[in-house]
Image (cartoon, rainbow, N blue to C red):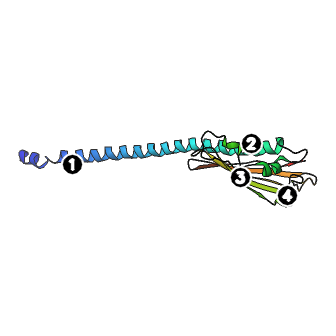
Amino acid sequence: MKNKNINNQRGVSLIITFFIMIIVLSVVLSVSILLYSQLKVLRNIGNSVIAFYAADSGIEKVLYYDWQVKNGNIRGLCSMAINCIQDPNPNNILTEHSIYCNDLKPTSFIGGCDPAVCNNCTISFDTSFGINGPTYHLIAEVKPSELYPTSSDFNATAKGIFGGTTRQIKTPIYATE
């Protein structure tokens, strides 16, 4: 009788081994899925930082023009609408692309973006940093101030894009003379 029980249980060790292998395989697969998703998050963090700094460079560019490149007492933003030029070779890696404004679109140019007036103007433009480099799209506007009748309000919004990741920066609205 004892010998008969031993013969009936010979395949049990194979089944137990199979179940242990399935459990180990499922643990390994779940850990690898978690690690893969964490690697994607880390890659997106790097792209996010680059996109953020691309947007920041767009804000800095428009602030530089608005504050530094003025025609007398006239705002620099409106002179930017006239002086910005298209990048002649956007695919050249050696060119400094940040000085160009591609797809510049001033709105309400007559009586608004005219540098002699510059009190109601919206401009938008794109800048690319190389072939596969970061890009930014910027919209800047000057409007008559609601609080201070002799001033105008200025704000700018820049969206940086890199590697499928987008970050946006917006300046607070502030009144200027």
Left or right: 28 as drawn, with respect to 48: left
- The residue lying at 56 percent from left, 50 percent from top is 164
In the rendering, which numbered label is found on residue 125? 3
- The residue lying at 68 percent from left, 46 percent from top is 55
Q: For label 3, count other residues whose C-alpha is less than 10 Å away and answer few (under 14), some (14-19) or many (20+).
A: many
Residue type marked 3: Phe
Mark 1 and mark 4 in contact? Answer it, CB < 8 Å.
no
How far apart, in angstroms, are the residues tagged by discs 3 and 4?
Answer: 17 Å
How far apart, in angstroms, are the residues tagged by discs 1 and 2?
Answer: 68 Å
Sequence-first disc among 3 and 1: 1
Sequence-first disc among 3 and 4: 4
Residue type marked 1: Ile
Task: State which mark lies toward you, 3 or 1.
Answer: 3
Mark 2 and mark 3 in contact? Answer it, CB < 8 Å.
no
| Element on which disc 1 rests | helix
Residue type marked 2: Glu
Question: Outermost residue, top direction?
Answer: 94
The vertical placement of 144 against 97, above or below, is below
| Residue marked by disc 2 | 60
Task: Judge whether residue 172 can be spotted in this image.
Answer: no
| Element on which disc 3 rests | strand
Q: Position of residue 5 (x, y in %)?
A: 10, 47
In the rendering, which numbered label is found on residue 172? none
Sequence-first disc among 2 and 4: 2
Residue type marked 4: Gly
- The residue lying at 74 percent from left, 43 percent from top is 61
Task: Judge whether residue 155 can be spotted in this image.
Answer: yes
- The residue lying at 94 percent from left, 52 percent from top is 150
Task: State which mark lies toward you, 1 or 4.
Answer: 4
Q: For label 4, count other residues whose C-alpha is less than 10 Å away and answer few (under 14), some (14-19) or many (20+).
A: some
Mark 1 and mark 2 in contact? Answer it, CB < 8 Å.
no
In the rendering, which numbered label is found on residue 15? 1
